[in-house]
Amino acid sequence: MTHPLMSVLRRFMPLAALACLAGCGGGGGGSTLPVPGTSVAATATPVATSAPAPAPTSTVVISSANGPCQFQTANQPLQAAFCETFSAPAPIGNRSGPLDGTLWGVSRQTGLYNWGQGWANAVAPTVLDACGQSSQVYPDNDIAVCNGMVFESVNDDTSVTSLAMYPKQPFDIAGRTGTVTFDVSDDTTGSHTVWPELWYSDQPVPDPFTHFSSWQSVPVNGFGLRIESSCPANSGGGCGIRQYCPEQPESSAIVTVGSAVVVNNYVANDSAFGGNVLVKDLDCVKASTGPGNNNHFEVRFSQKEVDVYGTDAGTTAPLRHLAVITNMSLTLTRGLLWIEDVHYNADKEGAMDQRIHTFSWTNIGFDGPILARDLAFDVADSLMMTNSAQFPDTQPDSAMQIPGNLLNLGYSWFPNTPPLALTVPGVYNIGNANGAFLTLNAFTQDPVTLNYQINNGAWQSFVWPFPTCSAQGATSACAQVTMALPVSLSDIQAGTNTIQLNASDAISFSNVDLILRGAAGVPPAPVTTSSHHGLNPASTRTRSGLH
């Protein structure tokens, strides 16, 4: 008699083309890099460590053009709500690596799902360029903190990937225009390579992200900004965005805003893919030369308009008005902010140097009311090594091929098998929470009803809320989604909690978290050491006639 699992695997063997999303190659054997942590079977119970949150400390904020977390465009008097300068590593043993995992959450997604080959959010080894050295690593060692910056690296392995980091403190724009500030080494060479994104989501769903219609990992309501339009050095006046900054020398690579997506009730309105959101480019800035050489960006959010400002890499002035985004309506006024490293098969564009790539980030901040932070408790990644070597380059550039097999971060469940059992250790401060979620990314071929249980609580069902899945030939392709499942606080217990999951059809899970809303409390206000009133004409550049 055939085991029911084997029939399911045979059914889904053709998913290789679907799951890879772009340009996947074959794989054989290969040498293996050391894997951080302990590998566990896909249905095993992962173990991680957690610790109570340290007492919050005040962070110095300088709103002038001479220090961290600048708020050059913010409303005055400045009410800074958050500023992170990454002064030192602060690991607590979760997916956030060396980041303070009580404050920061990290989620990773790839296009590498293939049940026939045993892939569930599989990642290839990458090279992290940080802290004066280059290291071959897997997650969670793909992040480093040093020199007042966080460095993170991704190997897209001829697929689509997203690495997202977020502070667990809400950003509120109700009745006002709010300001988000961040520095990043934006050295993108275009929308088929690697670029930074900023997302704003109403719920703490992991890795909000979209890629064409085939990957709609959208929150209920949200906004995404892509800073991926570029022209290389010496590209000539005919290169698209040079018209917005003709004074920039031809010898300099330049970048600006490329597109934006507004999400209302799970439906994405994407300026890059037929949506009616309007992105009007106004200016551009010199691109970064690599990690540590950062551009400074400020994004002004209201429900009807978003304005993006930036500086040349390595400078903090003048601040140029890069783009205005209109013909939009945000239905959220409070949510979480995500900074993301996004790849789209850079080999296919011929940008092999961006297939394996490191970004640096620092001075992440926002203004507005200071609200209670969430506590999020991670389920450990599966860290199961697959039998598949990373994909070979599609271009003859052997220097970009580093040894190592694909590593699964996710877990898979198939029909007619027991529920997937996962554990969340170290849960605390339940009495301080005003609500709870089970959050996760899921990959499935068809719309499903998701069933879940926390400890000995009642089983609950979450009916598929997303729009119709895209189709590839006669096969539907729901692909990756992101979810926040409501949880009763009475089902949660201090210490270790057990989560059980299954669905109405085959499914993979990753980036699973138990979220306690507001349980970390309200942090102290950041300390503002200097400020100025409004935009400083000497340090802010707006193109005449376009503002």
Image (spheres, rainbow, N blue to C red):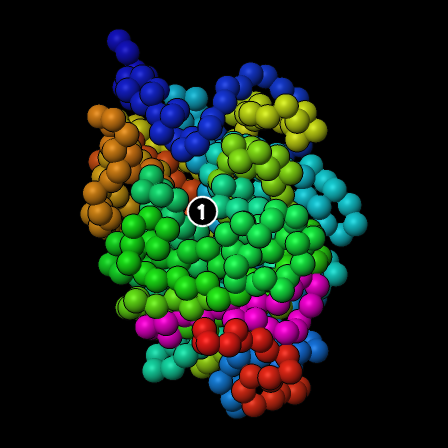
**Left or right of 442 on screen, residue 530:** right
Residue 223 location in percent, x, y? 37, 61
Residue furthest right as drawn: 132
**Left or right of 213 on screen, residue 545:** right
Closer to us: 408 or 207? 207
Residue 19 location in percent, x, y? 39, 31
The quarter of the picture where residue 177 lies is: bottom left
Q: Is residue 315 magenta?
A: yes
Q: Give the vertical position of 265 relative to 156 (above or below).
A: below
What residue is rendered at 59% in x and 17% in y? 29
Quadrant in the picture for the C terminus: bottom left
What residue is rendered at 69% in x and 76% in y? 67
What residue is rendered at 58% in x and 42% in y? 154
Closer to us: 525 or 290? 290
| Secondary element at tag 1 | strand
The residue singled out by tag 1 in the image is 511
Residue furthest front as drawn: 237
Q: Give the vertical position of 352 relative to 424 (above or below).
A: above
Q: Give the vertical position of 12 relative to 160 (above or below).
A: above
For label 1, count other residues whose C-alpha is less than 10 Å away and answer few (under 14), some (14-19) or many (20+): many
Q: Which amino acid is tagged 1?
A: Asn
What residue is rendered at 48% in x and 66% in y? 282
How many numbered circles does the render carry? 1
Answer yes or no: is residue 228 visible. no
Residue 414 location in percent, x, y? 31, 29
The magenta segment: 302-322
Residue 408 location in percent, x, y? 50, 33
Quadrant in the picture for the N terminus: top left
Residue furthest top as drawn: 1
Q: Give the vertical position of 31 relative to 239 (above or below).
A: above
Closer to us: 259 or 303? 259
Q: Is residue 43 magenta?
A: no
